Image: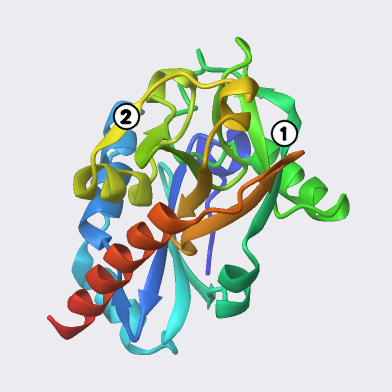
Amino acid sequence: MQITFDEGYQFGLGFFETISVEHGRPILLPWHLERLRRSMKEFGIEQDVCPEEISEFLASRESEHHALKIMVSDANNLFTMRPNPYTAAHFRKGFRLAYSHVYRNETSPLICHKSMNYGDCILEKRRARSVGFDELVFLNSRGEICEGTTTNIFFVKHGTLYTPPLSCGLLPGILRRFLMESFPVTECRLGKEDASQMDECFVTNSLMGIMPVTALEQKEYTSHDVTQQCIEVYRQFVSNSLRA
């Protein structure tokens, strides 16, 4: 693997996608490529990633329950593969969350893109584990809930799904899109007080899918009925995709 030190690898002006691969099938690949191409176009990166390249890469590798990473910058187009770190044990236990002391800049032109400017997320993810949590949740400069370090966040109140809008400063996640196209979801600005009044909470990303949340700081979430409905719909979608 040879890397050219362009603006992507020197200054973070590149983009990546992390895709769940189950039994050799990349899940929701068209949506991942759509998001990647949108970012590349907006930032003037004249490359493309073809599904045929991905198929060729996957064909020679173990990919039963893995994560495919695509990294694209001006002069680079790289693929890597690693095992998917999420197991059934994670879902049985659920995630415990806390608020990050780092604030999201909702005015940043990079915030809604999956860019290589990912240091805040990685450092805060590491800090979460060091203090006994699974994930930290970012607030923006207005004190509104944005997203987790590597996840989008959803809440449930009286059976209704809620999630922050993109204007709060967050990545339009692939699983976020899946849920918004599969269920009625209300986008609204949410603060800490709102989160403490919710019945359920869960977080999403492409590798974990939908993860139940058992607590956000002092707030305990003991109900997971709607969360489980979302999980079942997504699992059925993945199952159908593998049979197609």
**Real-space Cα separation, disc 1 to disc 2, in angstroms:** 22 Å
Q: Residue 106, position in %: x, y?
A: 52, 17
Q: Report the front residue among 13 and 112.
A: 112
| Label 1 sits on residue | 99
Residue at the image position 52 percent from the left and 51 percent from the top: 4
- Between 205 and 186, the residue placed more toward the observer is 186
Judged from the image, the secondary structure of the residue bearing numbered disc 1 is strand
Q: Which kind of residue does numbered mark 1 sit on?
A: Tyr
Q: Horizontally, is 138 left or right of 170 in the view?
A: right
Q: Residue furthest front?
A: 158
Nearer the camera: disc 1 or disc 2:
2
The residue that mark 2 highlights is 186
Q: Residue at x 84, y 54 (%)?
A: 132
Q: Residue at x 47, y 39 (%)?
A: 155
Q: Is residue 197 above or below residue 5?
A: above
Type of residue at label 2? Thr
Q: Which residue corresponds to the image point at 62% horizontal and 42% vertical from the top-left?
A: 149
The location of residue 235, given as percent across then percent down, is 32, 71
